Image: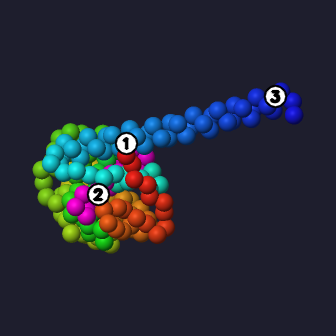
Amino acid sequence: MNKKNVFMILGLIIFLSLGLVAQSKTEKTEKKDFEKFLSDVYPNKKFDYFLCDKIIMALNEGNIYLLSNDFLATKGYRGATNCLVCLKPKGEIVEVSIVKSGETPSFIRRIKKGPFLSSFKNKKLEDIDSVDTISRATLTTRAVKDDITKLLKDYKLMDIKVVKGNIVSSKHKISKIK
């Protein structure tokens, strides 16, 4: 093996190592952001955090909280909108919140104050299409619906259950994040 091949192999090893370090750092950063958001919204609740296929989940009193990250969030008119979805273990929505958005602040305020987010309550994946978008904020509300649909599809694919205070899956490895 010549020097050029040795340097290429070493370079590849270093590149892959940096990628793994960056990935775990990203997961820790996302968990930290998720923790901060949840503690701001729910200051008196304690959560346990879990990771499955780059989706960070939180568990509190049997409900599962899913957060769309920047890679999953759907773009609306001006940018991505990240949603937090609280689910009962069988996939029924308890609550939806907008965590952050690149959209026009007045549109986001209108969406947060109006009945749009609460119209997801008690819905399952197959019911999301029945939620109407808001006129004059159609792209943004459609992006929110798409975001929620993606989260619920991922949730369903993961075949998640809550067992003795832990999130488990028969199809995917789920690890508790400290």
Type of amino acid under label 1? Glu
Residue that protrudes farthest toward the right in the picture: 1
The vertical placement of 33 against 152, above or below, is: above
Residue that protrudes farthest toward the front in the picture: 164
How far apart marks 3 and 2 lie (CA) works out to: 51 Å
Q: Secondary structure at mark 3?
A: helix
Residue 111 image position (x, y, % from top left): 18, 50
Colour option used? rainbow
Q: Nearer the viewer, residue 169 or 154?
A: 169
Which label was assigned to residue 9?
none
Residue 54 image position (x, y, % from top left): 45, 51
Q: Which residues are magenta?
A: 58-79
Type of amino acid under label 2? Leu
Mark nearer the N terminus (3 vs 2): 3
Q: In the rendered image, which residue does mark 3 sit on?
A: 4
Q: In the rendered image, which residue does mark 1 sit on?
A: 30
**Dot 1 and dot 2 residues touching (CB under 8 Å):** no
